[in-house]
Amino acid sequence: MIKYYSRDLMWLFGFLVANWYFIYTQATSTQFFVLDFVALITMLGIGRLQYELNSIKQTRRNKKCKNKKILKM
């Protein structure tokens, strides 16, 4: 499961503000769709990469803990 943090929520907030701005300025639907698509893909990509990095860090921590337990025995 993908975990999102405060930076992801700030990105989502910026996405919503951008949507409001484009509606307010009556931008064309093509511009609106393209920018929304780019923002969503970027947000999901960053979230996924962060999740992968966190899982790699957790795996390394678990291996270090197991190695320390083995050495103590």
Image (spheres, rainbow, N blue to C red):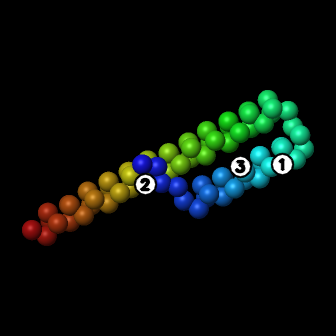
Residue displayed at 24% across by 64% down: 65
Q: Is residue 25 above or below residue 17?
A: above
**Left of 70 or right of it: where is 43?**
right
Distance from label 1 to label 3 (Cα)? 10 Å
Q: Dot 2 surroundings within 10 Å: few (below 14), some, or many (20 or more)?
A: few
Q: Which residue is mark 2?
A: 54
Point out residue 50 in the picture as x, y percentages from the top left corner: 50, 51
Looking at the rendered image, the quarter that the C terminus falls into is: bottom left
- Please name the amino acid that badge 2 sits on: Asn
Residue 53 visible in this rendered orientation of the protein: no
Point out residue 42 in the picture as x, y percentages from the top left corner: 62, 42
- Please name the amino acid that badge 1 sits on: Tyr
Q: Which residue is mark 1?
A: 21
Residues at circles 2 and 1 in contact by the CB criterion of under 8 Å: no
Asked which secondary structure carries label 3, the reply is helix
Residue displayed at 66% across by 52% down: 12
Q: Quadrant of residue 61?
A: bottom left
Disc on res. 15: 3
- Please name the amino acid that badge 3 sits on: Phe
Disc on the earlier residue, 2 or 1: 1
Q: Is residue 61 above or below residue 51?
A: below
